[in-house]
């Protein structure tokens, strides 16, 4: 583990210019983060700026790994919580530098998720004595293929750096707590038949016609909507691909339906696979890949106080927690036993869009709620 | 139109050696034809031998086109019939040279269809004064892509060479008359949907699930078995391919089923397309390609006397005519207005197999029946 500056990174990714003033207004800090371009795979300069801004702070221990920066308080508190955010963005789409317009900050990464990173940085800089120890994780390569994901790398190689009781990912949720995430599994279900010349179809058995019964099972499938740790999930089982056919004059003997099962976090990947096998009991099922879901952990003390803090009566605008249906990096925390939620100031609807923006007021609101949680 | 010899083909495809004795026994002549290798596209040597054997016969006019040889009587008879056969074979599969075993002649092309070609050649050589004028067609490239088919080339470029009242293709039918052929049409039927993330499938509409209804239509389809010119055909409508899917996490908005309609020769290709559009009325249908069928023409005088001759009481072993269900080159005759049947000595079941063989007795039997028809 070597500091980014110590690695001589400045020579290749540009010198650190001290662009980040962690005590500036949230809007100003967010704009500064947006203006340091950091498309996935090219986050070194921003990571170096973050390390450079955090390192002088005496209440933090700062470490780096590649373009990931981790800062920790070491106050010996009985609880440790993690505030995590990715510093990369999707490719720039003519939306840099940032600009403000009617209460909004526009620019690449403004909602997903440099406004969340700004909240992390302002809390890291100013919370010298939080009631819970805090680990701030700023990681790379979230927007691209899973194997390059910085949080995944740390959880595989140095899970101790992520140790804690509860984690908050500051992904754009519009200020709503989105708990846990659903798992996902892909499997192939194969219908078999007997090949024949299509001029004498009755001498064979058409696997594509047989596959209609697989699709009938999918159409009749009644997904569960289970409640897990107080949040309601919504499962789904769907065909995402189908293929069959040998030649224009041949009755095919094989047709494969690829299904995607999105499952609530009360099932393991193994249980999800078992379920898919049961549903398609008449046909061979091959599981292609699976990623576990994550329980929201709303029963944990840290989570309960978090939810109370961010949805409390005094804090207008924050909705009741809801289940996260898509797969997110909270599952990486779940895999190492840490309940996690998504909660951030950005607008999820405009993530990855060229007109991406964040409501400026929501940045300070999010920060205030998290500050309340960490100081109450 | 130039003679193969005049084209100097001997230089490129080997000298003509006079290997074919058209007055030898049918078995011997078939063996000689089998032993002159003539895989599709490499028939020049065999074509040159055929031309060389036929040209000296004063009762025939012999012409060539590429590796196709056409010999005609010009007796001014009121009827003209065509005896046609392809001289190419599928690739050799360790089954050359020919050999005999328990009344069978084995070897590449023995059944499909050099035994039929032997019958054509023996009739051409010996029938100096048939009661019907006869056109003998020996053509190339039947076993490969349709556009290279020699009979197709002649029918497009010089249909007058194929003029006549009735045609017999000496393809392997085991000595049974197979009349006409069914047409074939391929079409794409497309189910549409709405794309969505598979974690929120209910926000979209799954085109693959929708395609189940297309397959249900196929499964419920009741094909006709119409009688045409006294023969019973059997139609069929089948999926021959299906494809859909965008990515493992996307609800697809498009799924395409490719169907193959095999239709009796009482429908035109246009009517067949109309029928498919009606059957799949709820979905867009795109016709990809179509080939017309061929009526058996059993009502034609030449056909009636042909059937009487080859299935007469005195001729044991020949079964009643049956409908040809697969598409064959008889459709090329139908396209230029000539009714045609398949009738040959080979065994259809072993065509294209490495253990291909012909029952030797059937060669002479087929020849005798055709001779009776052409001399009675």
Image: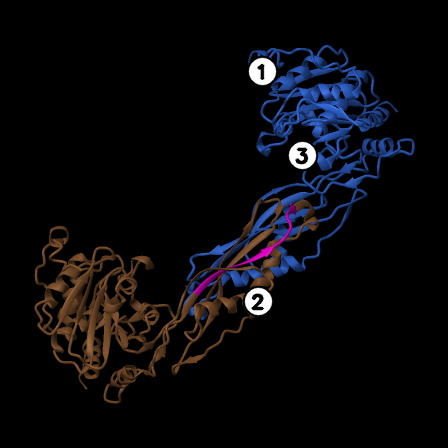
Chain colours: A blue, B brown
Q: Chain of mark 2?
A: B
Q: Chain of mark 1?
A: A
Q: Which residues are magenta?
A: B185-197
The reply to whether the magenta stretch includes residue B190 is: yes
A312 left or right, relative to B249: right
Majority secondary structure of the magenta segment?
strand
Residue B242 x %, y %: 51, 56
Name the residue that disc number 2 marks. B217
Q: Are marks 2 and 1 on the same chain?
A: no
Mark 1 to mark 3 CA distance (whole Å): 27 Å
Determine crowd level at label 1: few under 14, some 14-19, many 20+ residues with C-alpha closer than 10 A: some
Residue B17 seen? yes
Camera-near label (1 vs 3) is 3
Camera-near label (2 vs 3) is 3
Which numbered circle lies on residue A13?
Answer: 1
User: Quick one: SS at disc 2?
Assistant: helix
Determine crowd level at label 3: few under 14, some 14-19, many 20+ residues with C-alpha closer than 10 A: some
> Which one is nearer the viewer's eye here, B43 or B201?
B43
Which numbered circle lies on residue A353?
Answer: 3
């Amino acid at each position: 583990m070597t500091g980014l500056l110590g690695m001589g990174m400045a020579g290749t990714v540009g010198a650190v210019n001290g662009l980040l003033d962690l005590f500036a207004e949230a809007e100003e800090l967010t704009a500064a983060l947006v203006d340091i371009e950091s498309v996935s795979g090219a986050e070194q300069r921003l990571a170096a700026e973050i390390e450079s801004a955090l390192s002088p702070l005496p209440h933090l221990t700062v470490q780096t790994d590649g373009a990931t920066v981790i800062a920790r308080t070491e106050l010996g508190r009985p609880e440790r919580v993690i505030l995590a955010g990715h510093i990369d963005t999707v490719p720039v789409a003519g939306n840099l530098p940032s600009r403000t317009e009617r209460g909004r900050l526009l620019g690449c990464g403004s909602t997903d998720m440099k406004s969340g990173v700004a909240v992390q940085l302002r809390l890291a800089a100013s919370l010298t004595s939080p009631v819970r120890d805090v680990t701030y994780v700023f990681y790379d390569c979230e927007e691209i293929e899973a194997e390059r994901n910085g949080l995944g790398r740390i959880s595989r190689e140095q899970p101790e750096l992520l140790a804690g009781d509860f984690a908050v990912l500051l992904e754009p949720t519009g200020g709503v707590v989105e708990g846990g995430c659903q798992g996902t599994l892909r499997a192939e279900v194969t219908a078999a038949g007997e090949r024949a010349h299509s001029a004498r179809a009755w001498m064979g058995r058409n696997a594509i016609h047989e596959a209609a019964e697989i699709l009938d099972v999918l159409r009749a499938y009644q997904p569960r909507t289970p409640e897990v740790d107080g949040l309601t999930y919504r499962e789904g089982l769907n065909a995402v691909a189908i293929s069959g056919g040998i030649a224009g004059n041949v009755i095919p003997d094989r047709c494969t339906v690829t299904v995607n099962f999105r499952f609530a976090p009360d099932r393991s990947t193994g249980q999800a696979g078992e379920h898919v096998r049961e549903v398609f009991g008449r046909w061979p099922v091959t599981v292609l890949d699976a990623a576990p879901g994550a329980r929201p952990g709303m029963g944990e003390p840290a989570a309960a106080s978090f939810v109370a803090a961010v949805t409390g009566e005094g804090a207008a605008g924050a909705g009741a927690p809801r289940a996260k249906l898509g797969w997110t990096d909270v599952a990486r925390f779940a895999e190492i036993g840490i309940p996690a939620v998504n909660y951030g100031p950005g607008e999820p609807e405009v993530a990855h869009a060229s007109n991406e923006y964040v409501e400026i007021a929501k940045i300070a609101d999010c920060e205030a709620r998290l500050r309340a949680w960490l100081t109450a």
